[in-house]
Amino acid sequence: MALSLGRRLYNLTGRREAGAEAAFPPRPEGRLIWLHGPKEGALQGLVHLANKLAEEDGIATLVTGPREAGRMAAPADQPVEVKAFLNHWRPDAIVLADDEIRPALLFEAEARGIPAMVVDGREPSLVRGRDGWFPGLMRGAVQTLRHVFAVDEAAARAYRKAGAAQVDVLGRMEAVSAALACHEGERAALAELLKARPVWLAAAVPQAEEAAVIAAHRAALRLSHRLLLILVPEQPARAEALAVELEAQEGWIVARRALDEEPDAETSVYLPDSAEEYGLWYRLAPVTYLGGSLAGEGALRDPLEPAALGSAIIHGPRPGPYGATFGRLGAARAARAVGSATDLAEALGDLLAPDRAALAAQAAWTVASDGAEVTEKVLQRLRQLLGLP
């Protein structure tokens, strides 16, 4: 079949000489789904989708993305490399995330009968060049897609205008697995102990941020003298020295979990020394500050962890790998961004009001729950495309 002018021009702009086939890792046996995220932020939902496919359906996945995110790169979008890649991996389905349309891949997949779909879809753009340079190319490529799950109505309109036949607005997929577990007996006992006290959590706090957290707690105690801070240091070994400093410099009573000390009515700070009980702390604290986001390299815990357990979120200006997630939570008024230690104290004081904390926590839970529903709908559609029950 003769290629369209736009498709011929596109292939010529990316043309490379055929050479030896690239060396790929061995393909796993059985069904395999290829998942591609062009940006680091797009990978979070795909990784969770891959985990669900393995756990629930026993299906292997190949996840490609930016090399700086530690992923295998997708082939260049030109026929020689695409064919070599598909010859080796033989995917049963292809899932593309975000906004990147790869015409050479989509046309080759259609020729081989491999269904392709888009998830977390934003307004589409060609992986190389501009749509106007290649007449009809975008429409032809988009028409090969079996389904598009768009993040919003603007993206859905763009895909429909480009020729996509089946488009639904779903929002973004879940980026973490189910809510972190905890020992229910421990939770019930601590909840009973703390039932008359306001509580906030500072999670994975690097030493460089300890002063800001301590200052925020000091300021908040003036508004709520019974407030308890659950402070989890980034480095568990830091807990012992931190307890000594807080008692000596602030005059606070500190309880350490490692010593089986319980936070009684006089305790100002409760110091866990393990990163293995966040499911417990998120459940006990209506407000969570995510360490690393103020003066560190970026948030050290995924914001959807507290969100899934109904804890309102405070974070600094450094999101780390969670920029997209913080953006969703912020848009839903489920997270409060702060730029300094002073801002942290003000945000904490504001969220200590039970009604405000409850509204933010409910919004956070809704964002996390919506993502889970999106992931489940994507799974259902993939199963349909593969002919699975």
Image (spheres, grey):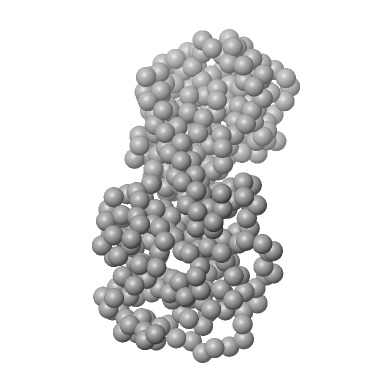
* The residue positioned farthest toward the right in the image shown: 259
Q: Position of residue 145 (x, y in %)?
A: 40, 64
The quadrant of the picture occupied by the N terminus is bottom left
- Residue drawn at (58%, 47%) of the image: 52
Q: Position of residue 274 (x, y in %)?
A: 68, 33
Q: Position of residue 34 (x, y in %)?
A: 55, 63
In this rendering, position of residue 187 left or right of residue 360: right
- Residue drawn at (43%, 74%) of the image: 107
Q: Indicate whether 382 appears above or below 142.
A: above
- Residue drawn at (59%, 51%) of the image: 53
In this rendering, position of residue 373 left or right of residue 21: left
Q: Nearer the viewer, residue 33 or 330?
A: 33
- Residue drawn at (36%, 67%) of the image: 142
Q: Nearer the viewer, residue 305 or 300?
A: 305
Q: Position of residue 184 (x, y in %)?
A: 64, 22
Q: Is residue 304 visible?
A: yes
Q: Is residue 213 visible?
A: no
Q: Indicate whether 359 appears above or below 84.
A: above
Q: Nearer the viewer, residue 34 or 200?
A: 34
